[in-house]
Image (tube, helix red, strand yellow):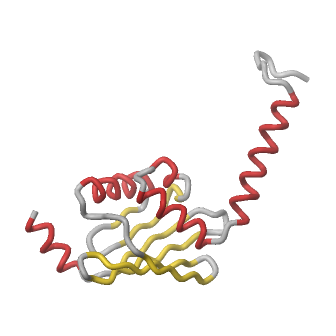
Amino acid sequence: MSDSGSTTSPKAKFSAYLSNSMQRIESSAKSAKEIVMEFVQATEHQDFQTARGYLKENVSYVSPLNSFNRAEPYLKYNLHLYQTGQLAKFDVKEFADSNDVCILHEWNSQLVCVWYHVDDDGKISSIKVIFDPRPYLQFLQQK
């Protein structure tokens, strides 16, 4: 049987299939912590196309200042934070427990906790940010 109009050889299709399978295996072999840290690194480099690959479409993001239930609005918000200087690269301490990863960092002399949950498919399904928003709101008022 042949695909009508297809110029891809069966060997090339099989190679592409193997390559895709290996990527899925490599992704599934990564720990939740590795996935989250790669996501954080991509966002710090403002590589939101790569960052998007780590998120479920219906990722839940909740913080004292905002919430989203889809990847694209969350990433646009994240980009806005970087572009306006409200988010920067942080010195972090991370902890992992199975599919949950917690990152602690300081922003403006304040402790911030970001709790990620990675589903078994290797995608981040929820992000919860915990901090006292008062200093942040004061910072915004000064700008």
Please tell me which residue is depicted at 15% across the width and 71% down the height of the picture: 139
Instruction: Write down the quadrant of residue 127 in the picture.
Output: bottom left
Please tell me which residue is depicted at 40% across the width and 52% down the height of the picture: 46
Foreground pick, 58 / 136: 136
**Is 112 rendered above or below residue 20?**
below
Quadrant where the N terminus is found in the figure: top right
Please tell me which residue is depicted at 9% across the width and 68% down the height of the picture: 141
Please tell me which residue is depicted at 29% across the width and 75% down the height of the picture: 107
Estimate the x, y position of residue 39 in percent, counting from the top left.
Answer: 51, 61
Estimate the x, y position of residue 50 in percent, counting from the top left.
Answer: 52, 50
18 displayed left or right of 95:
right
16 displayed left or right of 135:
right
Quadrant where the C terminus is found in the figure: bottom left
Foreground pick, 66 / 132: 132
Residue lying furthest left in this view? Answer: 142
120 displayed left or right of 45:
right
